[in-house]
Image (cartoon, grey):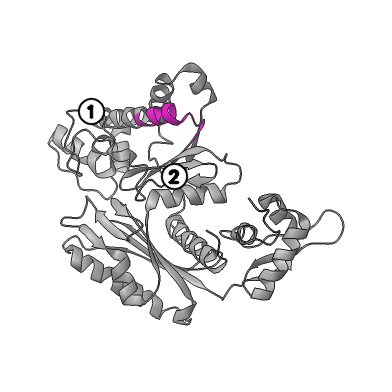
Amino acid sequence: MPKKSQTSPENRAKVISCFTNRKSLTQEDIIWTTHLSRPTVVDILKSLIEDGIICKIGIGDSSKGRNPYLYGFTSNLYYSIGVDFDYPQLKIGIMNLSCQVLIQNTLLVPPTLTPVQIIEYMLQQINKLLQQFSCEKSQFIGICISITGLINSTSGISIYAEKISGWKNINLKEIFEGNFGITTYIKNDINLMAQLTYETHPELPEDFIYIGIRTGIGMGIIQNGEICLGFKGNAGLLGHTTIEMDGDLCNCGKRGCLESIAGEQEILSRYIKLTGNKVETDNSYETLINLSKAGDPNAQIILTKASNALALSIANIVKIFEFPTVVLDGWPLALTEPFRQIFESTLRGNLFENISYDLNIIYYQSDPTEVIRACGSSVVKHYIKKRYDFI
């Protein structure tokens, strides 16, 4: 293979990618992150400044010698739109190239809407946000829709969303591009979050398992610093792995899925079925935790079973990949005893001793805007690859 020049598209992409999700960097930061030589970084920075996409934004601190310049994306150059659709919740945000959320809105989709009406509602809400934000349409470099369920990320089709009746094979990419004239990407929410978590937490290793718990339960596999997406972008459907062959019916149509035992909506359904008590709540886990603390044995049984089911699922994944780090994001029982202890005991008890010894479980609670930021980060990466011919 021919030797690549120092200013190859790949090296330019490495440098510019450093700025995604970060406000400012020094030359030393870039050299340390990219492992490129100083002359290469200096040369690339100069070309990016001339290109207008990067600029000097300030002066940093130094314990010795001259204070270094801080570099960052040109703040008002381009923008992205992030759509976090975790039915029934809908979050929409507009971000700059550094993935700072500049304006956002959070809504609940009315439960009576059909799939066609839901899409129309989404389009209306995005238009409302755009009307509040002052910039030229040409400054938008992309829309990224984060969505649960099955997708085809290449064609931009949402194949199936089990929580929405009648939602099948909807070409969101075609609809959104037709309405806004802006390139649109369709992504799995948990895969987006796994990649963002890696990029914004430098202390994490290059190989780890990310478990995200939202209205459903998903998994992202980070290997060599990259997300494993699968054939159509659906890798990591942990919530629909089978835990009980003849278990309860899941909303996906199969029986015994992890979500049918430990999902947000499902634990409440199990409690109602077990007790006959009609309970109305917007937060099933919080309600059952409070009932458990009050001594309700049925709530304790359900939360114990949920903890064990999640632990067994993760144990199986750890045995398959042998990654020693697991990030568990958004698990409502992470700070609640005895369920955290039950979870860890079951997880470690189902691993070989040497694997259990190496296992590091990181409990994490991401910010509500993180998925929107992850959408923005995805758009910026696509833009960088296209603009700088990096494939």
Q: What's the CA distance linking mark 2 and mark 1?
A: 27 Å
The number of callouts visible is 2
**Label 2 Cα neighbours within 10 Å, binned few <14 / some 14-19 / many ≥20:** some
Identity of the amino acid at label 1? Glu
Counting from the top left corner in percent of width and height, residue 314 is at: 39, 31
Q: Residue at x 78, y 59 (%)?
A: 39
**Residue of label 2:** 228
Q: Residue at x 38, y 45 (%)?
A: 230
Counting from the top left corner in percent of width and height, residue 144 is at: 40, 63
Q: Secondary structure at mark 1?
A: loop
Among all residues in the image, which is located at the extreme top?
353
Report if residue 35 lies within the magenta region.
Answer: no
Counting from the top left corner in percent of width and height, residue 322 is at: 48, 28
In this orientation, does residue 201 appear?
yes
Q: Is residue 324 above or below residue 357?
A: below
Between 53 and 21, the one lying in front of the other is 53
Left or right of 175, for residue 365 = right
Q: Is residue 78 above or below residue 5?
A: below
Counting from the top left corner in percent of width and height, residue 31 is at: 72, 53
Report if residue 322 lies within the magenta region.
Answer: yes
**Residue of label 1:** 244
User: Which picture quadrant has residue 71?
Assistant: bottom right
Left or right of 46, for residue 166 = left
Q: Residue at x 59, y 59 (%)?
A: 17
**Label 1 Cα neighbours within 10 Å, binned few <14 / some 14-19 / many ≥20:** some
Q: Is residue 379 above or below residue 77?
A: above
Q: Secondary structure at mark 2?
A: loop
- For the record, the magenta segment spans 313-328
User: Which picture quadrant has residue 45?
Assistant: bottom right
Left or right of 143, for residue 62 = right
